[in-house]
Image (cartoon, rainbow, N blue to C red):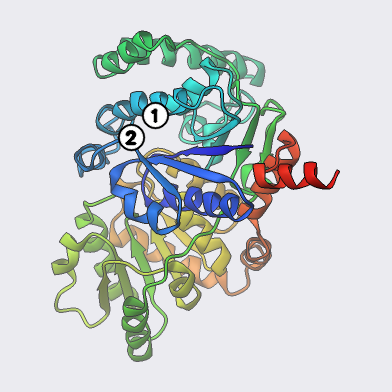
């Protein structure tokens, strides 16, 4: 195999595992090109990977603005961030036609995957969360919450399959998708409705007990566990440790790497800490730091690596992103999720079903509601077998290494250097 191309767009929590995957593939002898937005150039280049730009800083900020993260905004992130990346990603992969190339794409309806499919290059579809996998038997939240339990299961399955095609038709008629669809048509890869992926392999970066595979999941989907990543910050570690020495183990509140509007989370979070008389560490959302001023119980940090922080915390209140969810499981602490969109409601539902925490929707996130929930959660955590059991499993995870092993085994590939060595010794 001459070259591996990784395509990944998202927030930092999406990019970091893919960078780790690239590092491991490079360590094994592969040449790795990493396609992503300019926002992540320093991160990719620092890892020693070849950075290929598929989007500008302006596009990143437009697609990840305060309004883009509103739960009912289904336009901005796609129109300003993902759609513009289609053509440059497509053209880069097209330029490699004729070479021995493997494409690894986070998601599917992107330029890298489309080019691989059009030019018959092998590609692997990567999934960071189980909600992306369509299932008529076990649909993800919040869709599953809207299905009345009295409806027979076979009717539910029929309606879900029909709804899948209806949503595709609606997408194709929306104003903000027309430029994307026109680009695809011009490049000779018009978007068509498909019931299954054409990827030669699909990799789910979550464990089986979290994914809870349904019987209609793809047969070529392999689950490798959580790809836990951690970027240490000694300055914030020291600041956190000093705070804990003075105040004791805290609750941690975070909005996630993509969310900038933290006013409600920080306002109610401060009230929760004061009501429960426990310290709170508030991570991210620099604009909300002033909300915490005047409270000796509250500390604001722009960033803290959760591998260090969560093992010293009582619990975490967060948005439900997969990276934070996995780190909390690893630390063995309960979590209260305040999901906004994307995979977050489904992750929250799974955490609740596994006995690892609970969730509350943003419109209900008020101190008088949440403080008793956290108090009850902390009490149950003292005797929770689930927290200990799943923490042990995640701590033993080697997802990045396992993912590379699966790719090499299933696709029967080796880096060019090893292929050459084998020829010399044969």
Dot 1 falls on a residue whose secondary structure is helix
Q: Residue furthest bottom?
A: 246
What residue is disc 2 on?
54
Q: Quadrant of residue 130?
A: top right
Q: As drawn, is 37 to the left or to the right of 310? A: left
Query: Which residue appears at 23% of the width and 52% of the height?
Result: 260
Packing grade of label 2 (10 A; few <14, some 14-19, many >=20) is many
Q: Position of residue 70 (x, y in %)?
A: 25, 39
Query: Which residue appears at 29% of the width and 44% of the height?
Result: 38
Q: Position of residue 261 (x, y in %)?
A: 21, 51
Q: As drawn, is 6 to the left or to the right of 79? A: right
Q: In this view of the protein, can residue 110 be seen by the observer?
A: no
Q: Residue furthest front?
A: 424
Q: Are marks 2 and 1 in contact (CB under 8 Å)?
A: yes
Q: Position of residue 284 (x, y in %)?
A: 28, 62
Of the image marks 2 and 1, the number of the one nearer the N terminus: 2
Query: Which residue appears at 36% of the width and 16% of the height?
Result: 171
Q: Position of residue 200 (x, y in %)?
A: 65, 27
What residue is disc 1 on?
89
């Amino acid at each position: 195999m001459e070259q591996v191309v990784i395509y990944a767009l998202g927030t930092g929590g999406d990019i970091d595992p893919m960078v780790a995957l690239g590092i491991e593939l490079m360590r094994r002898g592969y040449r790795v090109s990493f396609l992503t937005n300019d926002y992540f150039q320093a991160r990719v280049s620092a890892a020693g990977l070849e950075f290929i730009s598929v989007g500008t800083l302006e596009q990143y900020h437009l697609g990840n603005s305060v309004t883009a993260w509103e739960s009912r905004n289904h336009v901005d992130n796609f129109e300003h961030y993902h759609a513009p990346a289609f053509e440059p990603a497509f053209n880069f992969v097209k330029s490699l036609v004729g070479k021995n190339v493997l494409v690894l794409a986070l998601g599917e309806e992107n330029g890298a995957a489309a080019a691989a499919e059009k030019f018959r290059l092998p590609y692997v579809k990567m999934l960071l969360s189980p909600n992306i996998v369509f299932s008529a038997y076990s649909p993800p939240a919040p869709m599953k919450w809207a299905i009345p339990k009295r409806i027979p299961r076979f009717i539910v399955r029929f309606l879900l399959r029909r709804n899948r095609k209806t949503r595709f038709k609606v997408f194709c008629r929306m104003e903000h998708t027309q430029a994307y669809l026109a680009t695809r048509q011009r490049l000779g890869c018009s978007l068509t409705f498909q019931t299954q992926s054409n990827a030669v392999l699909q990799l789910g970066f979550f464990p089986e007990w979290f994914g809870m595979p349904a019987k209609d999941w793809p047969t070529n989907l392999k689950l490798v566990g959580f790809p836990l990543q951690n970027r240490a910050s000694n300055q914030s570690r020291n600041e956190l440790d000093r705070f804990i020495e003075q105040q004791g183990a805290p609750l941690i509140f975070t909005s996630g790497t993509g969310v900038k509007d933290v006013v409600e989370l920080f306002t109610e979070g401060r009230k929760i800490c004061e009501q429960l008389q426990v310290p709170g560490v508030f991570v991210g959302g620099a604009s909300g730091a002033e909300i915490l001023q005047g409270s000796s119980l509250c500390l604001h940090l722009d960033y803290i690596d959760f591998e260090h922080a969560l093992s010293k915390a009582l619990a975490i209140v967060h948005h439900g992103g997969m990276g934070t969810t996995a780190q909390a499981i690893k630390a063995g602490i309960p979590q209260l999720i305040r999901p906004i969109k994307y995979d977050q409601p489904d992750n929250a539902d799974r955490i609740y079903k596994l006995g690892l925490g609970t969730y509350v929707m943003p419109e209900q996130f008020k101190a008088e509601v949440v403080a008793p929930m956290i108090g009850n959660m902390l009490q149950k955590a003292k005797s929770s077998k689930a927290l200990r059991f799943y923490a042990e499993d995640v701590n033993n995870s080697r997802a990045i290494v396992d993912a590379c092993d699966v790719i090499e085994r299933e696709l029967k590939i080796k880096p060019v250097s090893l292929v050459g060595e084998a020829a010399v010794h044969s």
